[in-house]
Amino acid sequence: MTILDRFRVSGQVAVVTGAGRGIGEASAIALAEAGADVVISARTEEQLQQTAAASEAAGRRAHVVVADLNEVDQLKGLATAAKDVFGRLDIVVNNVGGTMPRAYLDTSVGFLERAFHWNVSTAHALTTAAVPIMLENGGGAVVNIASVVGKLSGRGYLAYGTGKGALIHYTELAATDLAPKVRMNAIAVGSIATSALDIVMSNDEMRTAIENATPLRRLGRPDDIAAAVVYLASPAGSYLTGAVLDVHGGLSRPNMDMPIPDL
């Protein structure tokens, strides 16, 4: 086996959430290119069909599940779908999440709780449903898409950063519970050029400011994250669990300051 062979996941089955666009789309296609069949889910079928077509063009099978991934039962159903359609489940990529910035005094208890649910509870729901199926074939790998804001402080990021910070520590704790048969790792993502940053992409001044505030002087690309997903999910990453892989261009502070005035 060569070193490049260690990045293959041939014959494995992956579930990727939020796979209609951006990081989820890139991750699903990358896993297919690395040899996995994929179960892909999001709200928009048209986007999922495009991801499926690209995955199938790589020579693998893709199963589309249109779902509201804020709903626990629908998340659990993705693990069942992998078993029913492909007969196994080896890889889970918990990609759904995110929360809009909001000033501290405008952050209600409900908003904070919804951020936790969207970023942490969703990952827990899918993973707890997936693990028993993974164990049928000896184990598997889970990759959680977190954020650099889960590790750094910045104004306006209270709910989002708390949710992603909780996901990071969830990863560390769950990895201990799931070892040695199931590995769980996370990626602390920086500013990635996806539709979530459309306002940045369309504003040259704003984009330049963000790039200048990033040590590597550029926005990340979805395939930067997808490459990390393949590494963590494949035999190449087999000695990592409970790790948080920083893929954020070298940030030591957020590169997008929210224009929120002092109290």
Image (tube, rainbow, N blue to C red):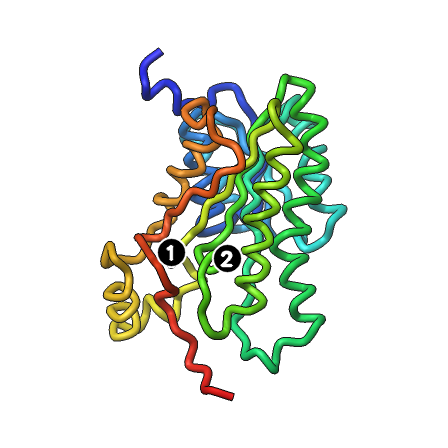
Q: Position of residue 217 (x, y in %)?
A: 23, 58
Q: Position of residue 202 (x, y in %)?
A: 32, 70
Residue type at mark 2? Gly
Badge 2 crowding class, 10 Å Cα cut-off, few under 14, some 14 to 19, many 20 or more, is many
Q: Residue at x 48, y 38 (%)?
A: 243
Q: Residue at x 50, y 74 (%)?
A: 156
Residue type at mark 1? Ile
* Residue 207 visible here: yes
Q: How many marks?
A: 2
Q: Which residue is mark 2?
A: 150
Camera-side residue of 20 and 172: 172
Mark 2: secondary structure: helix
Q: Residue at x 47, y 74 (%)?
A: 155
Q: Is residue 30 left or right of residue 38?
A: left
Tell me, for residue 192, which label it has, or none: 1
Q: Are marks 2 and 1 in contact (CB under 8 Å)?
A: no
Q: Position of residue 220 (x, y in %)?
A: 33, 53
Badge 1 crowding class, 10 Å Cα cut-off, few under 14, some 14 to 19, many 20 or more, is many
Camera-side residue of 121 and 67: 121
Camera-side residue of 127 and 183: 183
Nearer the N terminus, badge 2 or badge 1? 2
Mark 1: secondary structure: loop
Position above or below: 6 against 253:
above
Q: Is residue 212 left or right of residue 5?
A: left
Q: Quadrant of residue 177?
A: top right
* Residue 14 visible here: no
